[in-house]
Image (spheres, grey):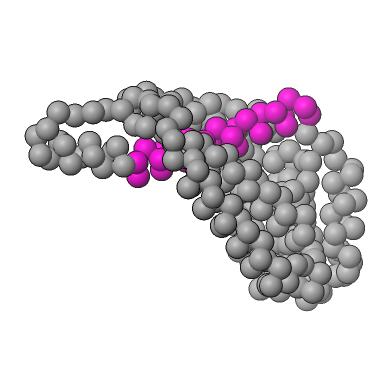
Amino acid sequence: MNRNAKLLNRSNNQLDERLTAENGRVMTDMVCYLRGSGLSEYHQELVRQDLLEMVLSAQERGDSIDTVIGGDYQSFCDEIIASLPPKSAFQKICGILSTLFLCAAILCAIGVVFSNDTFELIRSAIAGRPLNFHISVPVSSLVFFSLIIAFSVFIVQYICKTAFLTGRQKPGLGKNVLIGMGIMAFFLVIAWFGRAVAFTVSLWAACIAIVVMLALYKVLEQYEG
């Protein structure tokens, strides 16, 4: 999110606090749906600002949110989205790369901190033994990281796209449990067969890579729109 979008987001968050509980729930669904659209983050915040002002105005008059938006919230949002320019190809690429670099940096940091080699390095430092500043990266970790990133993006998009669906329209608990069990079984198979080391990297190189990825994320998010 670039600077202009962040400033508008901050202002919208303050307006959002003035909503009633009922209006707040509807606004949350609409904003969630907008997040999954092809609009830039700045245009999303502009739409959110207009919606908040409309709803707050109706709220002060004692009217319900349906009087200004109507009963079909999704159609209302679709009309707004269609009236605004979508992200350019450049903005989409920057958005994908910035998300990728942020997720990779976080996962790599977690991997470094909780690596067995890191724990062994700490134990060696305490015991006064020679220090080994190399971290082994197993195949399973690479697969896990890729799946976590892909699954996280899928979950976010799914939540945004189904923001207006009722509980009956969404997949039931039993189906979700079966899907979750299948995913867990898949992860266990990967963990068992992916214990081979893919490559070894220096701890310092890993830390530098994390910093570089975070820096690239900060640069690219300015061009997301």
Indicate the quadrant containing the N terminus: top left, top right, bottom left or bottom right. Answer: top right
- Residue at image position (74%, 48%) is 36
Q: From where the camera sits, is residue 183 visible?
A: yes
Q: Nearer the viewer, residue 218 or 105?
A: 105
Q: Main secondary structure of the magenta part?
A: helix
Does residue 137 appear left or right of residue 3 in this picture? left
Query: Is residue 94 part of the magenta span, yes or no?
Result: yes
Q: Specify start and end residues of the magenta stretch as a single range.
A: 88-115
Q: In which quarter of the image is residue 162?
A: bottom right
Q: In which quarter of the image is residue 129?
A: top left
Q: Where is residue 140 in the image (x, y as percent from the top left)?
A: 49, 41
Q: Where is residue 141 in the image (x, y as percent from the top left)?
A: 48, 40
Q: Which of 187 and 207 is in front in this view?
A: 187
Q: From where the camera sits, is residue 108 visible?
A: no
- Residue at image position (70%, 28%) is 93
- Residue at image position (77%, 67%) is 170
Indicate the quadrant containing the C terminus: top left, top right, bottom left or bottom right. Answer: top right
